[in-house]
Image (cartoon, rainbow, N blue to C red):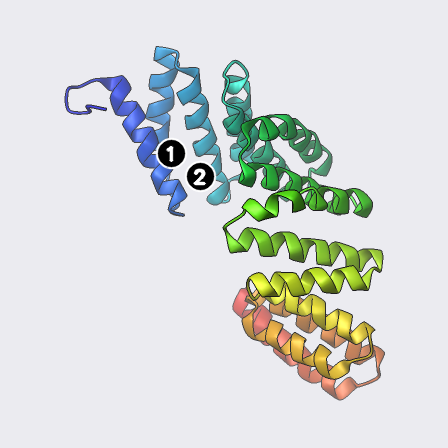
């Protein structure tokens, strides 16, 4: 790409690649001015592939800035533009992120429709991470719809692909997700197996907390408290507040009101930091 000779098409493509690099490095842009220029150029020259890419990254950036409504609208533009192109990876990413955005907006039925559309292009793309993301999002949506059997089915669909996964976070997320789902089903053996697998891959506060609940169910309060303390020591403030709230409920149910009161003070202080 020679951007020094005044070729506006090359310049727009360069700007698109630059924005993609910024996005993949985890940065959040303040606005979409650069991508809007790309969109204007690609509309003019009729390059639908690059136009769909520009809409896709614009939608992702908007979501990262917390602008969910506009992010959904932008990805709908990407969806419409991508219909006539042959890039299955891009089509799958558009649909699975539409599912993610609508799911975060509690539009679970719409999210489910989006995610179903992602499955075929994801499989055709052959991209392991996109296939896993699609099945995992399906599982999360079904979980939000309280359809736990379907949620487990789709999370288990990720398992044949884990041998190809090199990113530890992806592996641990799958194992922890299955562990959490099996707890809901009352299958504590499978829940424990997957929680331990998750911790073997990478220490996760949610996996330790799941193990805490399992050990308590088994009557081993020493191990349960140990796992819960590890979770409290590594969790972010939102997850810590959830754990402390559950502990407060337990102490109240057990009639240990002094300990419950101490927990309430910790919860209040934590809420103040989150306000």
Q: What is the tally of numbered marks visible in this picture?
A: 2
Question: CB of mark 2 within 8 Å of CB of mark 1?
Answer: yes
Q: Residue 67: where, in percent of width, then height? A: 51, 40
Q: Can see residue 34?
A: no
| Relative depth, front residue between 34 and 218 | 218
Name the element at disc 2. Answer: helix
Residue 135 image-quadrant placement? top right
Q: Above or below — where is 190 with respect to 150?
A: below
What is the x, y in percent for residue 250? Answer: 79, 76
Question: Mark 2 or 1 closer to N-term?
Answer: 1
Please determine whether, in this image, residue 66 is positioned above or below residue 172.
above
Name the residue at 60% across, 65% down. Answer: 199
Query: Which residue lies at the image location 43% right of the left edge and 19% below the top edge?
Result: 49
> At 79% across and 42% down in the image, what residue appears?
150
Q: Quadrant of the C terminus?
A: bottom right
Q: Which residue bears the numbered disc 2?
A: 61
Q: In front: 42, or 25? A: 25
Q: Which residue is mark 1?
A: 32
């Amino acid at each position: 790409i020679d951007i020094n000779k005044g070729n506006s098409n090359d310049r727009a493509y360069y700007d698109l690649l630059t924005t993609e690099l910024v996005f993949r490095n985890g940065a959040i842009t303040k606005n979409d001015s650069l991508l809007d220029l790309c969109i204007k150029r690609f509309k003019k020259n009729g390059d639908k592939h690059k136009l769909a890419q520009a809409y896709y990254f614009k939608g992702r950036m908007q979501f990262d800035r917390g602008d969910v409504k506009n992010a959904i609208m932008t990805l709908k533009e990407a969806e419409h533009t991508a219909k006539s192109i042959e890039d299955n990876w891009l089509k799958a990413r558009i649909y699975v992120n539409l599912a993610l955005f609508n799911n975060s907006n509690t539009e679970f039925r719409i999210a489910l429709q989006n995610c179903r559309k992602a499955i075929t292009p994801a499989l055709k793309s052959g991209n392991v991470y996109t296939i896993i993301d699609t099945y995992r999002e399906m599982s999360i949506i079904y979980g939000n719809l309280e359809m736990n059997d379907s949620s487990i089915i789709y999370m288990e669909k990720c398992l044949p692909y884990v041998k190809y996964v090199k990113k530890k976070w992806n592996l641990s997320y799958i194992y922890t997700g299955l562990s959490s789902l099996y707890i809901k089903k009352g299958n504590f053996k499978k829940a424990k197996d997957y929680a331990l697998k998750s911790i073997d891959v990478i220490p996760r506060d949610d996996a330790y907390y799941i193990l805490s609940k399992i050990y308590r169910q088994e009557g081993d309060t020493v191990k349960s408290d140990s796992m819960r303390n590890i979770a409290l020591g590594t969790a972010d403030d939102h997850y810590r507040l959830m754990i402390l709230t559950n502990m407060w409920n337990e102490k109240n149910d057990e009639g240990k009101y002094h300990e419950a009161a101490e927990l309430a003070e910790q919860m209040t202080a934590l809420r103040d930091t989150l306000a």
